Amino acid sequence: MTAKYALQRGLIALAQVATVVVFLVLWQLASEHHVLDPVFFSKPTDMWHQLLLWKRTGVLWKNIVDTMTVFLVGYVAGTVLGIVLGIVIGTMTWAREIMEPFLAFFNALPRLILLPLLIVWFGFGLEPKFILVISVIILMVALNVAAGLREVKVDYLNNARLAGATKFDLVRHVYIPSVSLWVTSTARVTVGYAFNAAIAAEFIGANKGLGFLMYLGLSNTEAVQIWTALGVTVILALVIDFILAGVETRATRWMPAA
Amino acid sequence: MSTSLDVTAGPAEEIGGPRATPEESRRWNIIRRGDPGPDPETRRHKRIVRIIQIAIVLVALGLWEYLGKSSKTLNLTISTPWDTAKWIGQWAEGKQAHGWSDLVVTLEEAAYGMFLGVLIGVVLAVVVSTSKWVRLFSAPFVSMLNALPKIALAPLFILIFGESVSARAYFVAAGIFFITFYNVFGGIRSIDVIYLRNARVLGANRRWLVRDVYAPSIVGWVMTSLRLTSAWALTGAVIAEYLGSVKGMGYIVATGQQSSSTPEVLGGVLIVAVVALIVDRVIVRIERHFSVWRLA
């Protein structure tokens, strides 16, 4: 059974690698023979050379760092602020009632379009980019934390109180573990949104970052730059997702396996 | 507003008679919709909350108007609510940008892209999830495409398809495709095996399964992703317009920013925000209507 299973996995992995190789070769050939217009579709070898060029001139690293700064600062700040806001909404009824329509409005608003406005307000520095990322994720975190706080089982609280738990103990042993589950499950989702927002933030009024590289490629009609930047972006996104998946398994290991 | 919409009014009031007492209207509500409705205490509480909310909005607007007028630089950056409202009014009359046709273009791109994206997303999700082999094979590609920030496709689509309405619609469709595909794919996989087995025990063939188990579930998942996709459709259309177009709400925002006309930027963003809000409310309504028969 296990041998058969391993064989299956091996075959599938082989098919996957083969598909990627065939895809790249076809792309290359189609582009060289003008089946695909190389002006728009570039080709894998050109992208590779572009990547090496960027790496040599330091462009690659500098722009990755910039995108990651916007992403990380915005993500961490957005999550922390979201947790704070979530605690406020989740524990203070009056605050939630008053804020409800404002939150609903903000939640339905496509927040990426706020960027031009933020640039007008905060200039061309990093601040509007941070704020954009924060604005995109803060409510998702907050609403989840608030829901998590409301869902804490009364039984657990009562049992802990009977066992002599102080208010601090309740927070430490009941609230935090149960809310941490909600936070980590949102973290995986918000990370995608935050990264998306970081890239979008660099389209407009930026002079650094992967999004800016794509924008530059568009204004110079250099397809190869767009494709290469896109490739780097995907790899970066996968790495982030991989790291977060690891964190998630660690953070939720106290839970019985679903 | 709330009093006219509230169903606390009794039959007496409807025919123009004397106002129903709270007790009467409670009884009437039990007959009409099965629950007594808010008691006077809750209604007063709600009214107080509403008053505080309106006060917050008024104070914020007043402060904004005051700050916007207090200095030249502030006026340039934050403008004033009155100037913004004036700009929106002029736009609606067709004196600024292209008037309503800007909004129509943006909505066209969003709607066309949404239709295309949902269609392709559902079809591919169904195809991929029918066979175990296809599923295992495509898993890493699916997660790779899902990790890709959709917005990053905008420059590519504009480059390839040019600065046209269809280019932006394709871009919108690409983002929507990913969202729909992922939701429906996950949805199909999460269908409880018990439903399938029960249906088979009752003698369902493949066609019945599709019609009575798969299709309702897929519709449900498309509905669930509709709120997400509609927000994305508007964002995608506006961002793509911002990057390169000669018409549309994104174009308004872009020209406003280039000419440092804050009322124009603010007006453009506000119009999109209001449209997004309306669309969102409508979808929530539709969702509620359909959730009755939805397979969880």
Image: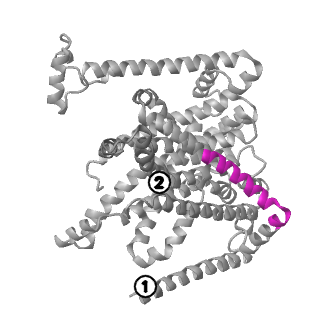
Query: Is there any visible trace of residue B248 in the rendered image?
Result: no
* Dot label at residue A5: 1
Residue assigned mark 2: A185
Which residue is depicted at the point 66% across and 30% down?
A: B264
Name the quarter where the N terminus of chain B is drawn. top left
Residue B208 position by quadrant = bottom left
Q: Secondary structure at mark 1?
A: helix
> Amino acid under label 1?
Tyr
Question: Residue B108, how many percent across, how many down?
Answer: 53, 46
Residue B49 is left or right of residue B39, and the answer is: right
Which residue is depicted at the point 65% across and 79% down?
A: A26
Q: Secondary structure at mark 2?
A: helix
Residue A61 lies in the magenta stretch: yes
Measure how far apart labels 1 and 2 are at the Cα level.
30 Å
Name the quarter where the C terminus of chain B is drawn. bottom left
Give the residues drawn in magenta, as a range: A53-76
Number of numbered discs on residues: 2
